[in-house]
Image: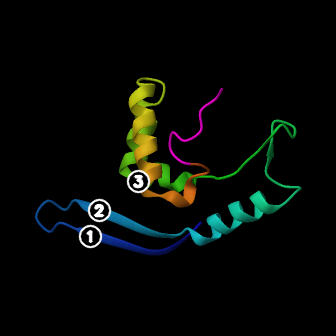
Amino acid sequence: MSILHTDVEVDPKTHEFRIKHTWDEYACLKACYEERMSGNQGWLHNGKAKKLAMIPRELFSTDIELKRYMQLRGVDNVEAKKIMDRWLMKHPEYRTSSIGGRKEV
């Protein structure tokens, strides 16, 4: 993903700064779509499974909810799953099915 725009805000009193990046997610979403529709790309585990969607790595370092998910993963998996489900409800472009819709038999 490429950065479209970067804003830097500096607090004149404390001299603290905040950086905000604006990303172009279209390229990643298009690549995921093409892998999903392709018969040759996107296979995992030597052809046993096919990758359906991908959350860009940059979002895990910029999005507050995904940062919290990464902190809790492996420590409190139940809470981490709730955070990820909530995030996927807000961002349906990264979902492959309904949240909680598929249950194994």
Q: Are the residues at dot 2 and dot 1 in contact (C-beta closer than 8 Å)? A: yes
What residue type is disc 2 on? Arg
What residue type is disc 1 on? Glu
Q: Residues within 10 Å of mark 3 (few under 14, many from 20)?
A: few
Place of residue 65 in the rendered image (x, y in percent of width and height, measured from the top left) = 38, 47
Compared across the picture, whether 38 is left or right of 69 comes to right
Q: Would you name the residue on which mark 1 appears?
A: 9
3D distance between C-alphas at marks 1 and 3: 18 Å
Place of residue 28 in the rendered image (x, y in percent of width and height, measured from the top left) = 63, 64
Place of residue 94 in the rendered image (x, y in percent of width and height, measured from the top left) = 56, 55
- Is 83 inside the magenta-drawn segment? no
- Colouring method of the image: rainbow
Q: Name the residue rendered at 40%, 46% in the picture.
A: 86
First of labels 2, 1 by sequence position: 1
Pick whichever, 6 or 96, lies toward us. 96
Discs 1/3, front: 3
Place of residue 62 in the rendered image (x, y in percent of width and height, measured from the top left) = 42, 55
First of labels 1, 3 by sequence position: 1
| Mark number displayed over residue 68 | none
Residue 69 to residue 21: above or below: above
| Mark number displayed over residue 63 | 3
Magenta-colored span: 98-105
What residue type is disc 3 on? Asp
Q: Are the residues at dot 1 and dot 3 in contact (C-beta closer than 8 Å)? A: no
Q: Would you name the residue on which mark 2 appears?
A: 18
3D distance between C-alphas at marks 3 and 2: 14 Å
Q: Which residue, as the protein is rendered here, is positioned at the far top?
A: 75
Q: Name the residue rendered at 45%, 26% in the picture.
A: 77
First of labels 3, 2 by sequence position: 2
